[in-house]
Image (tube, rainbow, N blue to C red):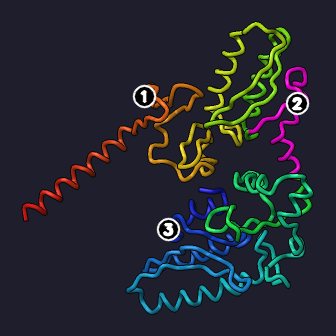
Amino acid sequence: MRPQFELLFRNHSYNVRPGSFFNVGSGWEHMIRQASAALSGDEDRVWITGGRKENGALALDYEVPADARPETLEGLEKLKRIIHDKSLTVCEACGKPGSLRGHGAVRCDEHADLISLEEAAKLLGMYQTTLWHIIDVGDVVPALTILHDGTVWHEKAEFGFTAADIVSFQEERDRRQFKHVHEQFGYVVPETAKFSCGPGWETVIRRLAEKLGRLPGPPKLVDGKEKFGSFQSRIVTHSSEHDDRIDELVRETRKLSLTICEECGAPGRLRMGQNIAKTTCDRHAHLAEPLREDDGWILDLPPTGGPIYADGQQGRYGVDRPHPEVERNERRKAALARSEIADTEGD
């Protein structure tokens, strides 16, 4: 689950349907909580199933039992009017008192004129896709973040930056460029070295740089990147002779990266998504979603050989080895299908 509205789902699960999408700013979260609390005392179970902006106001979607009592339906209509009217007085970005502005959005004075994502990208000297990714991670977000159907990548998603947000994103940009690593380990990490990975692996890079600094020369860490969920480094030496110690450091560093979240540096593990393999902590696991059914079965995707599985065995690339539980489920389904066919033929 993405960080936005995480507490809402966690604390109001009795009336907010899991997996619902709220295509509104976080400033309105308090009103969604109030609506959930208002519904909790009703004998008829009414679910909040999503939310969106409608003519500038908050409109919530509900799931109502077919046999709901008249008083429940009447109370729900009253709640809709209350939420609608109140949302027109609350800033969608921060939750402070606001009013409907000319651009059809309810904002306070502080957030009346926000910087667009396109303008922010130019000010920061970053690609828009990089900004989207940072927002998707969820640790640094602009004042106004309106996901659409749970994703930052949808064309209808909205973002608005304040001047303070630009400063925060500048700091995040520098962190992702590993400026402090270059400053501290310039004798091992050349100024031209590039690291194509998340900032959570700064610890991994630092440990490698420290150990390289103890070797004769010292060798230079010229670049590093994320590949198949682990950190792969390229090291250049001044000697024509092969040094096994460097090979060992490369392997050791790659293994270490598989235990650390690429985005924040917390303990993590390899997540096997449908389209990506990424090492994250639980909080950032959404970056690999949707996850494969056998997520957790594959622990490592080394450069050569094949996947390392949870039972310690190594497979071969191109030859799938299903998770035992998945395999058992498939056998059960096949047996059930055969049984149903036999019953049909018997009839």
Name the residue at 77% across, 57% down: 141
Residue drawn 42% across the image and 81% down it:
65
* Residue 140 image point, x, y percent: 77, 53
At label 3, which amino acid type do we have? Answer: Tyr
- Dot 1 or dot 3: first in sequence order is 3
Tell me the quadrant of the picture where the N terminus can be found: bottom right
Q: Is residue 177 left or right of residue 307?
A: right
Rendered image: mark on residue 182:
2
Crowding around mark 1 (Cα neighbors within 10 Å: few <14, some 14 to 19, many 20+) is few
**Marking on residue 311:** 1
- Give whichever of 118, 281 is nearer the camera: 118
What is the quadrant of residue 343 in the picture? bottom left
Q: Dot 3 corresponds to which residue?
A: 14
Whether residue 71 is situated above or below residue 298 in the rendered picture: below
In-front residue for pair 173/33: 173
Magenta stretch: give its range. 169-196
